[in-house]
Image (cartoon, rainbow, N blue to C red):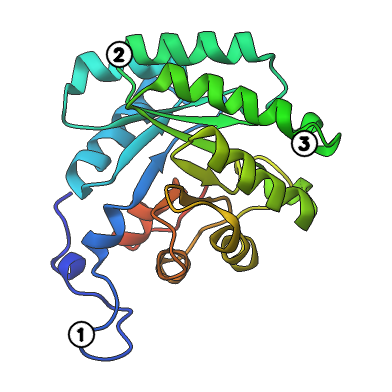
Amino acid sequence: MRLPETMDQCPLKRAEGEGMTLREMMSHVDHTQLKAFATWEDIVKLCDEAAEFGTASVCVPPSYIRRIHETYKDRVNICTVVGFPLGYSVTRAKAAEVEQALRDGCSEIDMVVNIGDVKSGLFDKVEEEIRTLKEICGSHILKVIVETCYLTEEEKIAMCRAVTNAGADYIKTSTGFGTGGATKEDVELFKKHIGPGVKIKAAGGISTLEDLELFLELGCERIGTSKAVSLCKGENAEGY
């Protein structure tokens, strides 16, 4: 399906010259397929859509990275998840996941922190794990999923410090598999407490074009969702 003519016309403008076009919005989307039962056919559909609609990346299970890389070359930017979705793998296991993903052709890593350690107040330990994975990533992008739905405000602030101190590229709100997703309040809190080198990715529960525009206007550089392309096509959007 070709891009609709409205792709370069923003239907959400409030006044002339304001707002983002749909194409601009899609350039901030990590087009996501992380269902446990995702087939290669599902992944092909995801990658074809990403290439056509110009999304920032495809976010996929690690097991598909090599095949995507061999099939699509540089037509899509590949992102994957590490320690997903619960975060309680040991650091050595997460490190091995990152190393394999990079070898297979991945460019971006979305890691889940050890939420139990966060809830236990072991922020130095969490920071060190993030630092370890960022050192492996090198120039590749590392996004840190803190799963805000389980955290207090104080814990969220502590994670902003840990992500900043460890040198990660992004702080990310949610896996999409927890009890809640991205909220306006959490993004605003992040903006107050992250360092200048850290960007924000919102994910979980973003299901309308208005949601996309809202989180981008709040200052998020990336949006993680499986729904953006369906929304642009005018289809019913289901999933993460």
Tell me residue 229's x, y (percent): 33, 52
Mark 2–mark 3 CB contact (< 8 Å): no
Instruction: Determine crowd level at label 3: few under 14, some 14-19, many 20+ residues with C-alpha closer than 10 A.
Output: many
Residue 64 in the figure: left or right of residue 134 = left
Residue carrying label 3: 118
Q: Give the label on residue 67, or none.
A: 2
Residue 235 visible in this rendered orientation of the protein: yes
x, y percentage for residue 75? 16, 31
Q: CA distance from mark 2 to mark 1?
A: 42 Å
| Image quadrant in which the C terminus is located | top right
Residue 85 visible: no
| Image side of residue 144 versus residue 149, left or right | left
Classify 14 as above or below 133: below
- Where residue 157 appears, as percent x and y from the top left, is 69, 53
Q: Amino acid at mark 2?
A: Arg
Going 33% across and 52% down the picture, which residue do you hit?
A: 28
The label shown at residue 17 is 1
Q: Tag 1 or tag 2, which sits nearer the N-term?
A: 1
Q: Amino acid at mark 3?
A: Val
On screen, residue 168 versus residue 5, left or right, reads: right
